[in-house]
Amino acid sequence: MNIRRVTRSTDPAIPAFGRLQDAVYFEPEMLIPARYIAQMLGAASEGRQDVLLVAEDERSELIGGSVFHYLAEAEAGFGSFLGVALSARGRGVARALHDARWAALQELSDGRCRALFIDVVNPQRESEEQRAHEAAAGSDALARRRSFQALGFRTVDLPYVQPVGGENGGPVTDMDLLAYSPALAARLPVALVGATMRAYWTPWLGRARAEQEARKLEAGAQGQAEVALLPAWEGPQAR
């Protein structure tokens, strides 16, 4: 297995990664399409670096990949997607991609990246239709959360809403925010959570709206400077 960083917008691994997303994730319309990933990799953005890592087998066929972002303003990363082909599961591909992703974040930040965040569906808030789509894609929300626990992620104990992307363009309310760092303790600074999501949301929402949504997120801590980290299969207790 070889893991490499895709740097050319014309790399054939990009459409292959798009096909992987469609094949293994139950709501591929919620993910960044391959054509936009190609544009992101070719664009310069101050304070943000977009990265695609791919895992390829001995025949140079794509068996996994991850798209993620380093957010210099927050000194943190946000992972948009990590997936492994069904035929390659159980071979350590997810772990290898996860480790390579963290190493890349440290390289991009000159060692300053403090944490990596992801948002993940909460199995208790899935609809029956979502569960059916999960089964058809060969996935399970609770199993996915347990897999993230094994990689070292923990649930951030804050009520989390993705401001846009849901029904009729409204908020997405069935996800939780998870965090990873080799140095994670039992609690995490609320300011780090807010700064990360503010930086991540700004290109979508504009700075004013991103600031507003980040403040809403931080308000879930009820004035506390730190927030608890819970097992990744659990949802926030503070909802």
Image (tube, rainbow, N blue to C red):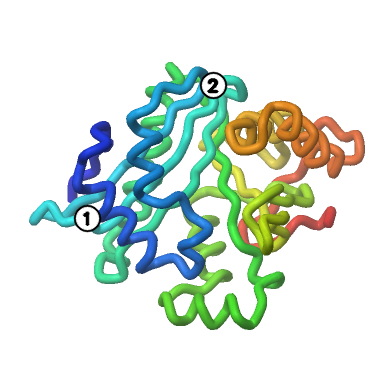
Q: Which mark is residue 62?
A: 1
Q: Residue furthest right?
A: 222
Name which residue type carries label 2.
Ala
- Residue at 38% of width from left, 23% of height from top? 107
Q: Which mark is residue 72?
A: 2
Percent from the top left, x then y, of residue 213? 77, 38
Does 50 appear above or below 1?
above
| Disc 1 crowd, CA 10 A, few/some/many (<14, 14-19, 20+) | many
Vertical comparison of 76 with 54: above or below: above
Q: Is residue 95 visible?
A: yes
Q: Position of residue 118 (x, y in %)?
A: 56, 47
Q: Residue at x 75, y 49 (%)?
A: 157
From the top left corner, tell me how far across and down residue 7 is, in percent.
26, 32
Q: Is residue 100 visible?
A: no
Report the Cα–Cα distance between label 2 and label 1: 29 Å
Q: Which part of the image, by quadrant, shows the C terminus? A: bottom right
Residue depicted at 76% across the width and 56% down the height: 236
Front residue of 229/205: it is 205
